[in-house]
Amino acid sequence: MSESTEYAGTASPAPGDAAPAASGGRSAWRSRLYRWDVKASPYVFVAPFFLFFGAFGLFPLLYTGWASLHRLELTDLHDSGWLGLGNYTSLLKSDYFWNALGNTFTIGVLSTVPQLLVALGVAHLLNYKLRGSTMWRVAMLAPYATSVASASLVFTLLFAWDGGMVNWLLGFAGVGPVNWRESGWGSQFAVSSIVIWRWTGYNALIYLAAMQAVPHDLYESAALDGASRWQQFRHVTVPMLRPTILFTVVVSTIGATQLFGEPLLFGGTAGSKGGASHQFQTLGLYLYDQGWINGHLGRASAVAWLMLAILLVVAALNLLIARRLRRSG
Amino acid sequence: MRPRHQSLTLRPKAGRHLHAGPVTYAVLSLFTLVSLAPLVWTAIAASRTSTRLAQTPPPLWFGGNLFKNLERAWTEASLGDAMFNTTIVAGSITVGTVLFSTIAGFAFAKLRFRLSGLLLLLTIGTMMVPPQLSVVPLYLWIADLQWTNQLQSVVLPTFVSAFGVFFMRQYLVQALPTELIEAARVDGASSLRVVWHVVFPAARPAMAVLGLLTFVFSWNDFLWPIIALNQSNPTVQVALNSLGTGYIPDKAVIMAGALLGTLPLLLAFVLFGRQIVSGIMQGAVKG
């Protein structure tokens, strides 16, 4: 695949020129133009993307780092003094920061683990020959079409203290009403349930795609060896899906680290604080609260970069695990 | 890791071909019920009154206030304006993302140029960086330009997408035969003609899928819009955020707003569900 060099060398009579010998000057000019076109076009094609990507993706990423080293207040955007690592040290001394970090972790685990386990099971069922297979898939993708804001507003009402559906249903099981918004674990569970509801069907489809790529004869030979359906799932499907499972774990972890809209709207008017006693304030909420409610944009930038640091650690761990899996597999 | 398996058939079948039993159907029905019930209940709640929604047991069937609540959400909570704005925003972003992702994806898939490996790595490497990493500088810019509360402030930052470039590249590597480009080249076609007559026709299915995914993503984008815009010129998510934080403290109207804001996408899923499903199964990445 090296048309640029190939054609640049052989293009002396301009390709497409019906009468090569017609007028030498014009043909030479055209061939030069043609050569230039072949050489420059790749850059022209990637230029618009990188123009926007550089301006709105890469540059802000670095600028956030610069801002995190300054005192930058919402009230006076042009008066920014150098602080060094001041924003970081004050964050690491703040109980609310550690509280938010802990909440992000527990809500992350509460939402990711059940989500992926159920998705795996559902994908396994979708992998049978089904009547109306597209219909099933589209139906379980409906929560994905629902925005974070819509879903959170609806779930907030479902988990309401007065007249909420969840407490009413729990009543039949003999469980007393739970104050979902005010309790620690209760509120974190409720926020997690929004994430689980929105993403389980989506992940099931990712797993289904991977399952469909597993060679059929692996199941046949497992069945010949007398493996039950469960054993086939456990010893054929899951090992073959390892790279996909790792991928969904990474993507879900990234999603969990930046969790924002769900707790914000679940909290109602106290949303950015993550509840009266910050019981479900995540890092994403803490950043927004610091930056746009309290007006400390420099501090908010420091939170953002700490978030990036966490994700880099996650990515490194992922590489390590993937390498180990490859070696053992 | 993948065991090489010599099969007698020419194309070894992938996946399983067992028929589903009644238990499978029952479990899938239950899961589908859990997926759809909150949406149906949104419509039920939107058809009731706020006082009724505070009583136990919660309503399980429709009441008579649906249109009154929808109208209040449309006018008082500005969802009418918001849906108009969001259509412009999501539409522009979709056009930009699909167009620029396709030509950049084509360059990465089929053309050889300096630094292409490095540039692709940069694109993929930053694909999943959270939006939180850019909101402070973006805010400083739009404050300087006095763009707060103007739609271009939410269009431009997500006008292109690294995921889109990667998605189109992966598709075109397989779907676009290199010989086709070479043949067009031999005929003397300029690069623009190659893109127009060879690349776009070959990329069309993937462009449609990327367009749908981008539209859904932009319609639902939350963090940056609620920073850049407010209730006087909102997108749908900004209007819903105002509802959630007490703009109109009427639960039935809030549910009517949630319903209105979701309906266009649910409609899109009914019409293009098959394409969206296939797009996600080709390896779409979250948000």
Image (cartoon, grey):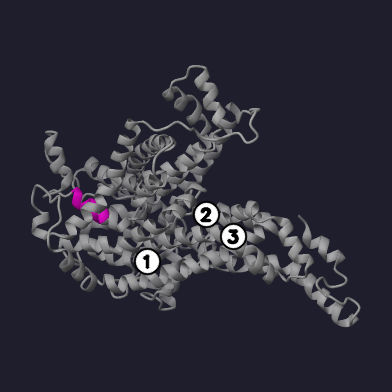
Pinpoint residue B38: horizontal percent, then vertical percent. Answer: 25, 50
Q: Is residue A269 left or right of residue A140?
A: left
- Among numbered discs 3 and 2, the one appearing first in the sequence: 2
Residue under numbered circle 3: B203
Residue at 30%, 74% in the rendered image? B81
Q: Which residues are magenta?
A: A152-159
Identify the image quadrant of the C terminus of chain B. Answer: bottom left
Looking at the image, is B228 positioned above or below residue A94?
below
Q: Is residue B34 left or right of residue B150?
A: left
- The numbered mark 1 sits on a residue in which chain? B
Q: Are marks 1 and 2 on the same chain?
A: yes
Q: Amino acid at mark 3?
A: Ala
Look at the numbered discs 3 and 2 and tell me whether their residues touch, using CB distance below 8 Å. Answer: no
Residue B200, how many percent across, how many down?
Answer: 61, 64
Give the residue type that dot 1 points to.
Pro
Tag shown at residue B225: 1
Residue corresponding to mark 2: B127
Q: Is residue A240 visible?
A: yes
Chain letter of the residue beneath label 2 in the structure image: B
Callout 1: SS: helix
